[in-house]
Amino acid sequence: MSPPLAPEPQPDPARSAGTVLLTPEDWARSHDRGRVHRARGGGRRWLLFWLLAGPGILAMLGENDGPSMVSYTATGAAYGVGFFLPFILVTFAMAILCQEMCMRVGAVTHRGYGELVLQRYGPVWGWFAAGDLLFTNLVTLIAEFVVIRVGLAWFHLGSGVAAGLGVVLVAVTLSGGRYWRWERIVLGLAIFNGLFLAAAIMARPHWGQAARSLVTFSPFPGGSLNTLLLLIASTIGATVTPWMVFFQQSASADKGLTHRDIRHGRLDTVIGGALAAAFGCGALIAGATLASHPGAGIQGQAGAGFPTALAHTSGNAVAAVFALGLIESGAVAILTICASTAYSAGECAGVTHSFNNPPHKAGLFYAANITVALIAAGIILIPGAPLLSIALNANVLATVLLPVTLVFMILLASDRQLMGSRVNTVWLNAAAAAIVTFVAGCGAAYGIDSFLQAAHLIPGG
Amino acid sequence: MRRPAIHLASTPIPRQGQRPVGDPAVFLEPGQLTATTRRPVPRAQLGRRATIALWALRVLVIILSAMVIYTFFSQLGS
């Protein structure tokens, strides 16, 4: 095993004096690492996995967010399971490959994506990356609040409750001053993403048709090319996004993962991807049961008609489960997206950025976390705001901005000075390059086609 | 040219006996300590082709984002 960067030539006064100056962040992380050390030493494999799991599952289930689940359901309602059921599995395979790189870089370097890009490639690229993230995160957060509102509407609750619920949830999870506590609360909420699979099972779909489509990728959807490109771009944007890259690398570092934990980090990412794919397919299959529905009820405010339509076709219980799933998906995504924004803000500003610090020690980190939630919550309270369009375009924007984020991820994971022997293999780089090309191609095709139609340079349709 | 660099990882975790009992640093790698992570990693030197390719991708992404935003507002208008 070749070591990464050589030791710093300047001596560390604290170390040379035989002592290590520990911050509260170090103490908290050391406590968590101590438990990992004892579980590993005692050969307690399940406990070790429980202690090391988190960032991968959260990134994947966090990305099964409100707009993504609405997008899957809308796709199912419009086209049935057909092409998109296996396509979702393909996109999650892509996501696993990308997220494994994030985990590995975080575990080896103990640094977040934002600070590594900024320090390694210069402030221009660092701030571009942070700017992309802030922009897409804000748009996506608005969409999350919209979807929570849609879910709550089934229970006759309004936008004020949705805004309050999201902001209170962020504030409560921030109150512990520990990464471990934050992670466990969000993991506890994220498991309810399985409600979409429950809704699909309760809706009694055609399982044989679903199984056939998994093998044949058919029937291929017909209709407008632009709509198809939109659905493909938004399905990609529903699976791999810039915030996931920032989040998993920073969370892996904040959790204290090391190069010894890479195998468990991979398992965490694969399990997260498998769960998210299963739950995403659940939303698609539940939506497909509406394929024969008249459709008037489906075309609502960012999928507001889905619970009502499901109530007509499958009963109130399915509708209630689906509505609860929408609330959960929006809530978990708010927590993870706010966290990725806060990590990025702290990393780019060069200040403390860890859940292992109390608020007075990491002011910018906590302020960024809550401020983006407040802004997004405030926007959904504006009467007449174009919430439907914002929700539908959030995933597409993420797809368009993703290639640059992924290219820097590949550069970091291939950087032998940073990664030592844990650098990307040639095959992994080839697969990652193919993913970047595919994502960029899909984003470009939709962006150009819709622009030409909107500018009346080509006929719509 | 070999640039000065900092230690990032792969340093073995010290065993319990190497530090005083109860010393929390025993469970952290040196590269994990806040004192270390606050020090920046050295700047990478991107080649001319890589720099041009990155800027080309950046410009493409900005143009595509502008197209998506334009489409978004034009859909609102209609």
Image (spheres, coloured by chain):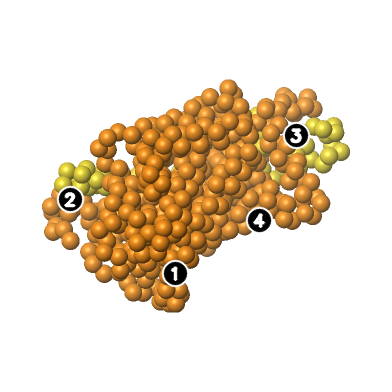
Query: Callout 4: helix, strand or loop?
Result: helix
Which residue does the image show at 41% across and 46% down from the upper left? Answer: A155
* Tag 1 residue: A204
Count of numbered badges drawn on the protein? 4
Circle 2: residue type: Ala
In the rendered image, which residue does mark 2 sit on? A454
Q: In terms of secondary structure, where does tag 2 sit?
A: helix
Q: Identity of the amino acid at label 4?
A: Arg
Circles 1, 2 touching at the beta carbon (< 8 Å): no
Q: Chain of mark 4?
A: A
Pointer 3: what residue? B25
Query: In what element is the residue under mark 1?
Result: loop
Please check whether the numbered discs 1 and 2 fall on a single chain.
Answer: yes
* Marks 4 and 3 on same chain: no
- The kind of residue on which mark 3 rests is Ala
Residue A361 is situated, as x and y percent measured from the top left of the image, at 59, 24
Residue located at (77% from left, 54% from top)? A44
Question: From what the image shows, is residue A226 above or below residue B15?
Answer: below
Q: Amino acid at mark 1?
A: Arg
In whole angstroms, how far apart are the C-alphas of marks 1 and 3? Answer: 55 Å
Q: Earlier in the sequence, mark 1 or mark 4?
A: 1
Q: Which residue is under mark 4? A: A263
Q: Pointer 1: residues within 10 angstroms few (<14), some, or many (20+)?
A: few
> Quadrant location of residue A256?
top right
Circle 2 Cα neighbour tier, 10 Å, few/some/many (<14 / 14–19 / ≥20): many
Cα gap from disc 1 to disc 4, whole angstroms: 38 Å
Q: Are marks 2 and 4 on the same chain?
A: yes
Q: Residues within 10 Å of mark 4 (few under 14, many from 20)?
A: few
Q: Nearer the viewer, residue A11 or A32?
A: A32
Q: Which chain is yellow?
A: B
What whole-number distance in Å separates the C-alpha atoms at marks 4 and 3?
A: 23 Å
